[in-house]
Each structure stands twice: as structure tokens, then as C-alpha cells.
Image (tube, grey):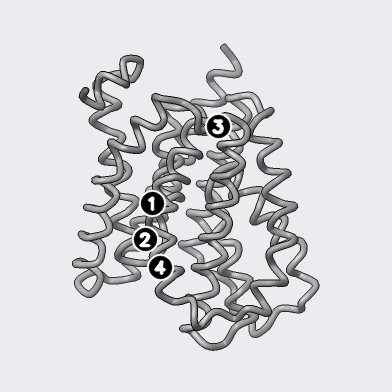
Amino acid sequence: MSLYTLLPDVPAHVLLIAPLIVLLGYTIFGATGFGSSIISVPGLAHFFPLTFTVPLITTTDAFAAMSTALRWRRLVAWREFGRLVPAMLIGITLGMTLLLNLPRNPALLALGVFAATYGMYVIIGPPKVASAPAWLVWPVGIIGGIFSALFGTGGPIYIVFLSARIEDKSALRATSSIVVALSIWIRLALFVATGLLLNSTLVAMVLLLLPVMALGLWLGNRLHHALSRGGVLRLIAGLLIGNGVALIVRAVESMRA
């Protein structure tokens, strides 16, 4: 049986556009180490509700993030990891509650604002913080967990905090990878428990997109040394701002209708 026969309700143009969005997201991820969810979720949200899009990309992210986390596990700063996990769990629980109960248009509006704001943040550049006090782990972990569950985009929030706590770049990459991987697997378990992943259309889309994800990672790894990091970041910022504004306009027009 063809995967396409399991997707009777998905328009043909979406079946063409969705793989291109995911290919772009994972090509950027392969080249820079981030960008899969932050690109894919806002792009796919034009065609699917967040209760479909976030579990979909979380599932494909699981395959990409786990291999990285296992490869770097010996360098993890376990003390910082242990501090972050409890707050992250609280945030993921709150974010899941919002994902299940927030109406579609307000959710799209919130995602649009987040995407456009993060795009501007990428252009301006992260603030140079020499160190961060340990107590910040609670607001950062909770906010990161909320965004992880609601939009699948909490990783950058964790990384900004951890970069102000961990000086060694290898330890930072390893710790960030395992934090993101744990967040993904916790969300996957919650998506199964709430029934969001028990959806034949969603499973068929995951199977359809896994080869696209693998191709994107391969392309990104090949392009890693050829691409300018500054150029890639400007591309990401432009995509986020454009997508964010489009989502805001779509949400506002739908609420007025």
C-alpha cells in the first residue's frame, strides 16, 4: 500500500510543499546544528493545526537529535543538565496544556509573533552574557519547556542559558544536545499518551518525511564548510520574519471573519 493512499485528506499541493519545507529545515540543521523545528513548524502551520504539526516535527526531530546526543554523551555537563530538567518538565506540562486547549487562530497568532520575534533576535544577535546565576534555570527551563511543547522550538532558549553557564564549547554542544533530545522524547511520550500521535495520517506523514529529513541532514553536512554561518543566519532570520508575519496576517484575518 502506498503512503499516499493513507493521506486522502491532504491536498496534493501540500504533499509537494511539505517535504520542501522539511528539507530546508533539516538542511539548515545539518549545516548549523539547529533550525529544523524553527523553520519547519511555522512553515507547516500554514497547512496543518499545531496539534498535528508539532508532534509531526517532534517525531522526525527524535531521529536527528538522538544520534547527536549519543555521540557527545561523554562530554555532557551533568550538573547543569540535572538543574535544568525539573524546570523543563514543568514547562513541558504547561505547554502541553496550552497545545491541547488553545484555539487554532490564537495559536497561529502566538506562533507568528514568536517566529517574527526570534527572526529579529537572530538578526540582532544574542546578548553577550559572561555568566548566568543558577536561579535563572527555573524561568529559563519553564519558558523553554512551554515553547518546546507548544511550538517545538524551545532548544534555542536552553542553548542561550547553557552558553552562559558552560565555558567549554564541546561540553556546551553535548549538554545542549542531550537536553534537546530528552525534551523531544518526553514530548513524544506525552503526544502518545494524549492521543496526538495515534493518528494514521500523522504516522503516514512521518514515514513520508523521514527520507526527506535524512536527505536534508546529508545535504547540510556536505554544505557545512561551504556556507557562511552569517549568511545562513540571515537566511533563517528572513524566513522566520516572513513566515511569522504571514501567520499573524492569516490568524488576524481568520479571527475577523
Give the label, 1 or 4, closer to the camera: 4
Disc 2 residue type?
Arg
Residue 114 vs 80, above or below: the answer is: above
Secondary element at image label 1: helix
Please give the name of the residue rendered at 60% of the width and 83% of the height, measured from the top-left corner.
Answer: 166
Element type at mark 4: helix
Crowd class of label 1 (few under 14; some 14 to 19; many from 20; radius 10 Å): some
Q: Nearer the viewer, mark 3 or mark 4?
A: 4
**Secondary structure under badge 2?**
helix
Q: What amino acid does circle 4 point to?
A: Thr
Instruction: Establish if 149 lies above or below 29.
Output: above
- The label on residue 106 is none
Mark 3 and mark 4 lie on one chain; the one further toward the N terminus is 4
Crowd band around label 4 with a 10 angstrom C-alpha radius: few (<14), some (14–19), many (20+): some
Residue holding disc 4: 68
Q: Quadrant of the C terminus?
A: top right
Q: Tell me which residue sits at (25%, 62%) in the image.
A: 220
Task: Return the disc, 3 or 2, that comes first in the chain's sequence.
Answer: 3
* Residue carrying label 2: 234
Image quadrant in which the N terminus is located: top left
Q: Nearer the viewer, mark 2 or mark 4?
A: 4
Query: As rendered, which of 141 and 82 lies closer to the eye?
Result: 82
Viewer-proximal residue, 92 or 167? 92
First along the sequence among labels 1 and 3: 3
Would you name the residue on which mark 1 appears?
238
Amino acid type indicated by mark 1: Gly
Residue 156 visible (yes or no): yes
